[in-house]
Image: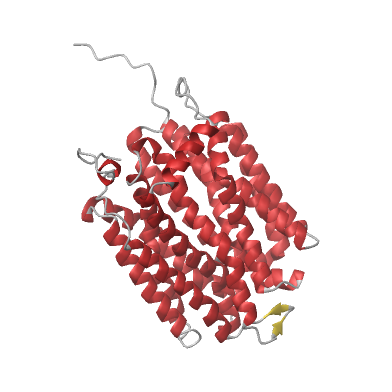
Amino acid sequence: MAAPVTTHRAPLPRLAWIVWGIPAFLFLLAFLHRVAPGVMAKDLMQAFNASGAIVGLLSATYFYAYAGFMVPAGLLLDAYGVRLVMTAGSAVMGLGAMAMAAAPGTGALFTGRFLVGLGATVTFIGALKIAATWFPPSYFGTLSAVTATVGVLGALAGTLPLAALIGLAGWRGSFWIIGVLTMAGAACCLLIVRDHPPGHAGADAPVPGLRAVMGGMAQVLGNPHTWPPFLAFFFLYSATGNLMLWAVPYLKDVYGISTTQAALYFSATSVALLVSGPLTGYLSDQVLKRRKLPYTVLTASYLTLWLVMVMTLGALPLWAVPVLFFALGMTNGAFVLTWPLGREVNPPALAGIAVAVTNLGGFLGAALTQGPVGAVLDAGWAGAMAGGARVYPVSAYRGALGVCAGFVLLSMLMTLLLKETRGLNIYHQLRGQAGPAARP
């Protein structure tokens, strides 16, 4: 019998990787922006006579914009395609970086930071949409993990490489360079990226309207089983986001080392996440076939390490600090289980909205806590200054990071309320309906 004739040709692998690689690169830059205030916190304090609370609020502005625009970003990508929406979003992100570089005061600085978060919203979803349309379905799980790993590479770039760039060009010059690089990425997106491969007619499914999306969100939010993963991620990323913001200033203030050296030591956390994120997902899917158990165990381990860090602040020898940071990164891989847990306790038809809602928890956590944690630092400030920036004593960092350890404790307690899904969609079981669990 003759082989059936196919109407669509498989895209050239090299072209597919290039088309996916440009949005992935823009997501890397978005993640670099997310962590950048941690490396330049002292520079910002000096330039704007800013307190810890101001620096915390500046960092949180990114998360406010990201969280608020998450749903509209998905709708725009569905309606107008990745090429146009990511080009526009990346241009906004680049303009925001340039606005921060030229900011004469805190108002312009906050405006630029908001624009960066606003433009960054489309990068991750856009990269995943390209992966879904340019690659066979069997590639999607792998590319989702690889895209998330690219984000971790962005966080890594926001440590030692960014500190080295600041040392060469200053914090304003660094923002100019990043802004120009982001604009160049936007131009590449416009010129090279296409929403569908050659010969592909495009998706025929209608784009969901705002009313349908908001109805789905209401259903997901009304499901009590959505809230444990939402809150677990809320508190987990509250601690992680604050650590990314204050680790480098802590090392500078307490150990008296340079920004570059402090960023190098803290990069151990991002290096560990490059391993722990994919490893946690693989062990959960293929070995343990559990979600709740690894989430709880890893979060409890993360809590233990946070308590060790808080109790030994300033007392650990310097060589042991990156070892502790690496261990924190290895146990922080629990966060990758948030999205499947949120998806598997909600209707299969609402999988995308369920993932978006649970993901929102982490961004809200960072947005709502970075300012108050900075205020805790300010409350412990003894008046010391260096180069126009505040120098905080160990006791101030112990208070602020102790609050963050409390966030991890709350996250661990939330994991005890999770439903074990075993990698299956159990929504109908939870509602008391007969029938086997469905594959998500």
Q: Is residue 129 left or right of residue 331?
A: right
- With respect to residue 52, does 2 lie above or below? above
**Of residues 119 and 424, which is closer to you in this image?**
424
Q: Is residue 236 left or right of residue 288?
A: right
**Of residues 191 and 221, which is closer to you in this image?**
221
Q: Is residue 269 visible?
A: yes
Q: Is residue 176 visible?
A: no
Instruction: Where is residue 19? Give x, y as percent.
Output: 50, 35
Residue drawn at x 22%, y 11% is 2
**Of residues 130 and 226, which is closer to you in this image?**
226
Q: Residue 166: name its quadrant.
A: bottom right
In the rendered image, the quadrant that contains the N terminus is top left
Way the structure is coloured = secondary structure
Q: Residue furthest top?
A: 1
- With respect to residue 208, does 437 lie above or below? below
Q: Residue 336: name its quadrant.
A: bottom left
Q: Is residue 436 left or right of residue 196?
A: left
Instruction: Where is residue 235? Give x, y as percent.
Output: 46, 64
Q: Residue 275: name its quadrant.
A: bottom left
Q: Residue furthest right?
A: 104
Instruction: Where is residue 179? Give x, y as percent.
Output: 68, 51
In the rendered image, the quadrant that contains the C terminus is top left
Tag count = 0
Residue drawn at x 39%, y 47% is 223
